[in-house]
Image (cartoon, helix red, strand yellow):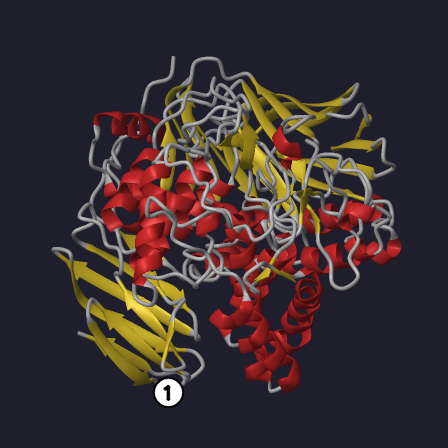
Amino acid sequence: MFVALIGIFSGQAEGLLLWYVQPARNWLEALPIGNGSLGGMIFGGTTNERVQFNEQTLWLGSETEMGSYQPFGDVLVQWAHAGPTNYRRTLDLADAIHRVSYRDGGVAFQREAFSSFPDQVMVDRFTADQPGNYSGTIRLTDMHRGRITAAGNKITSVGTLTNGLNYEAQLLVLNDGGTLAVSGNEIVVSKANRVTLLLAAGTSFANDPMNNWRGEPPHQRVTQRLDAAAKKSFDELRAAHIADYQKIFSRVSLNLGAGKVDLPTDVRLAARKGNSSDPAFEALLFQYGRYLLISSSRAGGLPANLQGIWNQDLKPAWYSGYTSDINIEMNYWLAEPTGLAECTPPLFAWLHNLAVTSKRTADPRIQAQRGWFNYSTINPMGGGSKWGVHKPGSAWLAQHLWEHYAFTGDTNFLRTVAYPAMKDVVGFWESELVANASGKLVSPGGWSPEHGPVLKNGKIVIQEGDRTPHSGVSYDQEIVWDLFNNFVEASAVLGVDPAYRVKIISLRDQLFVPKIGRWGQLQEWQEDVDDSKDHHRHTSHLFAVHPGRQISPLTTPELAQAAKTTLNARGDGGTGWSKAWKICFWARLGDGDRAHKLLDELLTPVPVSRTGMGSTGGGIYPNLLDACPPFQIDGNFGLVAGMTEMLMQSHLTQNGKQFIQLLPALPLSWPDGEVKGLRARGGFVVDMDWKSGKLVASKIFSLNGTPCGVRYGNNLRELKIGKGETFIWK
């Protein structure tokens, strides 16, 4: 029996804790740690601890076959602690450390675990307030029948996947006091005062299409990481981890008001069923999303996949891959505006490699005369699921390149990385577009994910999963408009390709644009065939509202109203990511209360039994991971993006200047609050505090010295804030 140690916490720490009074009973109650590539789900058991771990390059598949993301194995620890009391496990978002504490037999036991980016190892330390109280066994398991051996104080797992990928994990056991002994493939600990586990893992994957995605076997690299970490003290490892993590995470703080921080997180989540007000819980989910992206996407690695880096299934839902009709893009919407630019390099590297592999493909379905495109769902090597080709995917992904420049003002990145990639995809659409009967340019064979109009019994009906090509679908048209518009701006910033810029301006302005249909909706297809009773989870034809910038209440009020009509008809139901996107839509449309309604619904508790594919409704599991269901991390990330859009927007320009909208969609549920560190396009850092639903003050710090406009309500000011200077709006 576990007895709760309930306490009241103070200051910043109380708002950044996930905490529980019992160990996890299953994977969806376990808590995630990660360093961008090496991730663990920690169960927090006392007699039988389990850390299920992943390494993000452990992939089946190839450049031509989809495959799937694979679990690596488990670290299993068995201690002779049979009667724990005062149990508590926490994940502290302030320092990215998982902690467990309990008492047994008059002894206080503690442990700390983290996955270090600087040292590239997972660390788990077990301590007690009395000596000689750690006795038990430590094991390492392998999900792919690899060879496991134990020697000295190390357990090693070595194997090869069916696609030829070599992998290796090494677990080092360090004891203070007592003894260690090898028993078969296990290490037996007797009467140790403290035990520290260091885990390193790797594969022969190389993120390089020119070398066929393979590098050296991982043994030497894994051994070097482990040896280097073992030479450092636990305190040194911990300090390096915290310093690295906090440098990124601490840039943004959010206070939305008081909450039920004295309740365990799972109890607190369940309390929301009764419409219990807990704005601090929403702020916790905001920071949790930021924590998850830092933990699953760092320089030198792969992008966060459909589950970030955490997966226990040999056949994960949707391959745990990269789906480009919303999911991979949604993963990164929060990165720039919430100060996580260090998390974006893996996305840009993957995008570059995807262009290479798409151009050399033998599959005629994804061959292009100019530029490139690919399948809807893709692996790290460019291999796709082949269930659907997705032509606008490359254009949508290219938006992230422009956004990185828009937020940072990094002209070197724009010149050397973003602009060439954008121009490449522009070339594809320049050659792809055709004129319709009215002379407007349209995509000739588009698709609005993931349904379409079909003729049945003489009537047009919207059919789930239909992928019949249609010309001029709004989804395609809006993404191409966005690509062309961003390219034109990029060309002007760099002062290059003036003649080609004029040509693309002409093509952009000839594009068929979304129309308002017969019942006041924004048309999803070129033909006015939308069904007002269609409640499909995708609302892809509102791309122009978010993440695009073609439709806004401030610039195109009639189209914005049509978008609202569409959203009202489509309804507030849907999967986790679908609700997250609708939060973004309503925020951009200026309706904070409707956005908050969806946020509240997205934070509905979901029992861990609801994991089957095809379920709908959204929600979150006890460990606060998004329930599509099953678990998809895009809902966690999209939620953060939507909350950010409610507080600040910076996607529009006026008089050639980027302008920042302060509190454009503040809901009644957040009457008082404070946010610090949000990033705005143009290179600005924005702090705000508000009382009774009204802005009290905002500090706007300029990183680059570019002119801007600032808007609050109907009050718009054009400003020139010098580089390194701050403007205070009161």
Q: Which residue is found at the position 78% from the left and 22% from the top? A: 185
Q: Where does the image place residue 430, in percent across and percent down from the top left? A: 67, 67
Q: Which residue is mark 1?
A: 722
**Is residue 294 found left or right of 521 in the rendered image?**
right
369, 699: nearer the viewer: 369
Residue shown at the point (76%, 64%) measured from the top left? 370
- Residue 541 drawn at (x, y percent): 47, 49
The quadrant in which residue 427 appears is bottom right
Query: Quadrant location of the C terminus?
Result: bottom left
Give residue 570's quadrant in the image.
top left
Look at 69% across and 26% down and name the residue there.
Answer: 314
Q: Is residue 369 above or below residue 407?
A: above
Amino acid type of disc 1? Gly
Observer-nearest of 167 and 376 = 376
- Classify mark 1: residues with Cα within 10 Å, few (<14), some (14-19) or many (20+): some
Residue 631 is left or right of residue 55, and the answer is left
